[in-house]
Image: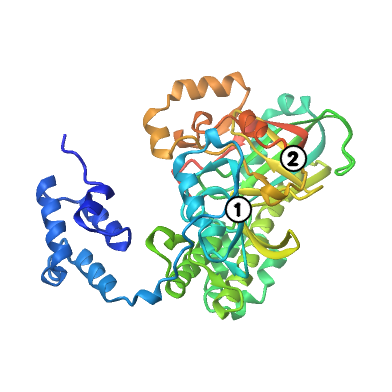
Amino acid sequence: MTQRINGNDLLALGYKENYSLGTALKINKKRLGLSREEMLNRYKEILGDPESFLSDPIFSPLAQVIIDENNQPADETIPLNEDPKDYKIYGSEQIEDGAKHQMNIAMKLPVTVAGALMPDAHQGYGLPIGGVLAVKNAVIPYGVGVDIGCRMALSVYDIPADKLTENKEIFQKAVLDNSRFGAGQGFLKYQRSEHAVLDNILFDEHPLISTLKDKAWSQLGTSGGGNHFVEFGIIEFKEADKTSGIQAGTYVALLTHSGSRGLGATIAGHYTKIAKELCKLPYSASNLAYLDLNSEAGQEYWLAMHLAGDYASACHEIIHTKMAEALGATVLAKVENHHNFAWKEKWHEEEVIVHRKGATPAGKGVLGIIPGSMAAPGFLVRGKGEQDAINSASHGAGRQMSRTQAIKTLSKKAWKQMLEDHGVTLLGAGMDEAPMAYKNIHTVMEAQTDLIDVLATFSPKIVRMADDGSRED
């Protein structure tokens, strides 16, 4: 088998760690019959004389990128600090090096004030998932993430725990009738819900968002693909909780996880592109391009981000309302928290913008939900307000393998057996969401005992996820 060409091979030829390196590696995926040695020779020739390859059907994109980089004034690129600022890592031994490398780069940004890495962290785009970053007067679209305002919502019902097992078909029907999953999925006009979020003035006045109103309306009350879910389970309070008002005992509960759907994804893509045009960072940090909050683009994104967050919350509200009505249940308590967002907060008396990309707010006394997987418990928690963690905690167990690796290596038989052992009925989902693809939630929780107190434990029993191969998470 021919050894593949990697970034180190190209760096040895004289390429720099910039866009030309990335473009060359993309082209390498379509070698079109050229041997490894021939490809390396061609890469060397293009680097020395890119103009002569401008009409080459394969290598012209690389030639153009090299020419553009050669002609770009050096002072257009915003330099990173030489050394990353110090930051706290929770559960370091279970976090992949790629996530730490991304966080190190984020800590070199000239606007960075502080950072932290949660124990469920893994590699993403720009800021790692599980990364918390506080910056001065700027917002990073990829520091927020593509699924803006993605969140957890928990409803605790006045239904004894044993009723879930006794009336399994009723709960299963409620899930199937009142949830819809997958990228691009929505409701027909006669099925759509109304909500005040659609009255936001941005849907009428914002050039981009005004084009998305119909999509937003059709997807209102739906869930995305990937790791998004709607699930019934049993929640156990070992002692009465004054914050939620719940007495000790076990109850049926509904837990949902989803975000801002196509609306948020479109906003994220649009403003990431603008940020990269306005904020030219070195190639290694390009996905951390930021918008000054004093700029027009920064203010536009800030408003759009908040709308996407409100929209995500509205989606959960509609799902939870439908479920309660379908069951004829009274909601004893509801808790909701979000990630993939940026907040204006005080950190050591300084006003900062805190990005929590896949991290749960955990300020002192703040309630949050940290799910495990479809076959592992989740937890209702109360934040301790730990400053080193920038008032944050993990947003789940976190992946320990990629979706591709999970599909290729995990056993369907073992997955099925695990669900049976935990008494879980699964409706939808693919092998990429198998519980074995995730870290051990108990290990993750042990790594953040300084950050949160556990109030209750939630055990999934009926789980609905996308079954169409969607990756909108």
Determine the image quadrant of residue 461: top right
Q: Which element is circle 2 on?
A: strand
Q: Position of residue 200 (x, y in %)?
A: 67, 72
Q: Mark 2–mark 1 contact, CB under 8 Å?
A: no
Q: Residue under label 1, please give it.
A: 115
Residue at the image point whose x is 48% and y is 40% from the top: 467
Q: Position of residue 397 (x, y in %)?
A: 59, 36
The circle drawn on residue 16 is none
Q: Residue under label 2, please give it.
A: 452
Q: Please name whichever residue, 135 or 193, is drawn nearer the observer in this view of the structure.
A: 135
Q: Position of residue 39 (x, y in %)?
A: 13, 52
Residue at the image point whose x is 55% and y is 40% from the top: 465
Q: CA distance from mark 2 to mark 1?
A: 18 Å
Q: How is the image coloured?
A: rainbow
Residue at the image point whose x is 14% and y is 65% from the top: 48
Residue 375 located left or right of residue 387: left
Residue 256 located left or right of residue 383: left
Residue at the image point whose x is 87% and y is 38% from the top: 241
Q: Which element is circle 1 on?
A: strand
Query: Residue extending furthest front?
Result: 82
The mark closer to the camera, 2 or 1, is 1
Give the residue type at disc 1. Gly
Residue 213 located left or right of residue 82: right
- Say if 234 sits above or below 179 in the image: above
Q: Quadrant of the N terminus?
A: top left
Q: Is residue 355 visible?
A: yes
Upstream in the sequence, badge 2 or badge 1? Answer: 1
